[in-house]
């Protein structure tokens, strides 16, 4: 048995998001979000599931923080629901909503757990959506105002801030593919929304600096690793487009101040282009303190004309898949992390999401989720390899602390290291929780 030691002060954690765990969808003045509207629309979410109750974490701060304390994490990534703070997106501040997050943050600090706060994890106030949502540039300034409120309220208590979770999901998945709220299917709109999200990020970082805030700020894009099935030119180009849509499309503006030419040309072929105003790219390229990376899967890609949006098709290699159908591709984790460092330099990185979906059930009070342990072990091994090769890795937060509302999949897909019975809301730590507890306690991985 090999013992792989992680760096001293490596920050182990776990992650959740407001709409996926809080419930209390209409409690204490909370306004409607686009996910309330989307999940209440028949046919949008599997089994008609909604986030109305979810894990009821809004009423279970002490119970959830006790789980985190038992796990032994140093950091806990959660998100704030914008509609709890500004029910209409702007205007009147909702104090009971703010008080909930003060209670949560105070409980985390009392348990010696660092809050890692995501400002936007997809639950846009519906009132802003009705004025165009992220497609309306005015939403950018409403976001900065919302962020500034939280900065002023929590300065010194929250020292780790993430502006936007996964701009690709908010723009392409939600406004071109239409799979997530609000469900538009318009490529031009999606590219403009992606641009506005990056602007909202950049302006928020500027405000963070102007306020002389304590701590650090970053962004958490999702990345994927897609390699060519062969060294044929068309396979290489197809894999590059699949990666480019997810990775470079957002990372190049953040670190290089421009969109990748090969993707600009591709989108122009699809009839869309980004509407950039003169100051935009300089605002987007604000220096950040860390990059959050969400990694789950990868694939081999072969060219197939007309397939998908990038003339590329994933090759079926017979790899094991998780219960959400994603390839288990641990070497892609190492590849994407070393690629990021080669492309964008020595930026400090936190893994803000990595985990596996297995629809495990409680048997005799236990959940023997050995496949999830195997997934995590394989990915932490690759993470250790990346650190050994010089990637500036600061911490790792597994997705997720507990089973929760998995967006369009509702409660049919479980990512938690804690099982949640959605009838009774009873939480049951899984075998993976106990395994991860040991990894954290010893700061090492045994392989
Ligand atoms: C390709 O996966 C994406 O990177 C991704 C996966 N996930 C995410 N993004 C979201 O940030 C979470 O809210 C999801 O619950 C989680 C699991 O689906």
Image: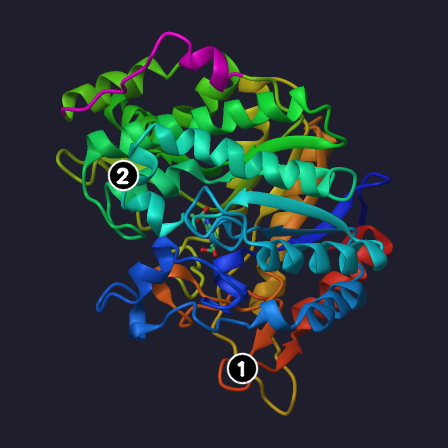
At 50% from the left and 21% from the top, the residue drawn is 254
Looking at the image, which is closer to me, 264 or 55? 55
Which residue is at the far bottom?
A: 364
- Horizontal side of 412 relative to 390 (left or right) equals left
At 66% from the left and 20% from the top, the residue drawn is 210
Which residue is at the far top?
A: 278
For mark 2, give the secondary structure: loop
Tag of residue 421: 1
Task: Give the number of marks.
Answer: 2
For mark 1, give the secondary structure: loop
- Horizontal side of 216 relative to 360 (left or right) equals right
Pointers 2 and 1 in contact (C-beta within 8 Å): no
Q: What is the image's colouring?
A: rainbow
Tag of residue 132: 2
Q: Is residue 70 above or below residue 82?
A: below
Quarter of the N terminus within the rendering: bottom right
The answer to whether residue 32 is seen in the rendering is yes
Q: Is residue 195 above or below residue 445?
A: above
Q: Name the magenta segment's main secondary structure.
A: loop
For marks 2 and 1 on the same chain, the one whose residue lies earlier in the sequence: 2
Query: Residue 47 appears at what percent x and percent y?
Result: 30, 75
In reply to whether residue 158 is colored magenta, the answer given is: no
* Magenta-drawn segment: 271-285
């Amino acid at each position: 048995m090999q013992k792989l030691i992680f760096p001293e002060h490596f920050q182990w954690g776990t992650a959740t998001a407001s709409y996926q765990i809080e419930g209390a969808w209409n409690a204490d003045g909370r306004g409607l979000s686009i996910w309330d509207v989307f999940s209440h629309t028949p046919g949008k979410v599997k089994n008609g599931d909604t986030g109305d109750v979810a894990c009821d974490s809004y009423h279970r701060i002490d119970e959830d923080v006790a789980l985190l304390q038992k796990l032994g994490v140093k950091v806990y990534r959660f998100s704030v629901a914008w509609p709890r703070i500004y029910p209409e997106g702007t205007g009147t501040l909702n104090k009971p909503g703010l008080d909930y997050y003060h209670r949560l943050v105070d409980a985390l600090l009392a348990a010696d757990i660092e809050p890692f706060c995501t400002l936007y994890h997809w639950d846009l106030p519906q009132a802003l959506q009705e004025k165009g949502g992220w497609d309306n540039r005015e939403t950018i300034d409403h976001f900065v105002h919302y962020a500034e409120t939280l900065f002023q309220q929590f300065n010194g208590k929250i020292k780790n801030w993430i502006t936007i979770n996964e701009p690709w999901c908010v723009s392409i998945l939600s406004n071109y593919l239409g799979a997530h709220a609000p469900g538009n299917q318009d490529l031009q709109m999606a590219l403009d929304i992606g641009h506005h999200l990056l602007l909202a990020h950049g302006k928020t970082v500027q405000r963070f600096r102007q306020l002389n805030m304590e701590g650090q700020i970053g962004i958490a894009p999702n990345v994927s690793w897609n390699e060519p099935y062969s060294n044929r030119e068309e396979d290489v180009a197809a894999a590059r487009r699949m990666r480019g849509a997810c990775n470079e499309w957002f990372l190049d503006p953040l670190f290089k101040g421009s969109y990748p030419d090969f993707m600009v040309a591709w989108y122009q072929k699809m009839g869309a282009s980004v509407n950039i105003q003169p100051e935009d790219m300089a605002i987007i390229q604000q220096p950040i303190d860390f990059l959050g990376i969400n990694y789950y899967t990868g694939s081999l890609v072969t060219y197939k004309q007309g397939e998908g949006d990038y003339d590329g098709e994933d090759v079926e290699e017979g790899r094991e898949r998780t219960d959400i159908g994603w390839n288990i591709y641990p070497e892609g984790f190492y590849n994407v992390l070393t690629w990021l460092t080669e492309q964008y330099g020595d930026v400090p990185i936190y893994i803000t999401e990595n985990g596996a979906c297995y629809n495990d059930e409680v048997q005799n009070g236990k959940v023997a989720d050995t496949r999830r342990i195997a997934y995590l072990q394989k990915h932490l091994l690759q993470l250790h390899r990346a650190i050994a090769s010089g990637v500036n890795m600061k911490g790792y937060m597994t997705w997720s602390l507990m089973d929760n509302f998995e967006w369009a999949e509702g409660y049919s897909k479980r990512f938690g290291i804690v099982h949640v019975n959605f009838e009774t809301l009873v939480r049951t730590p899984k075998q993976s929780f106990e395994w991860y507890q040991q990894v954290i306690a010893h700061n090492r991985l045994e392989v």
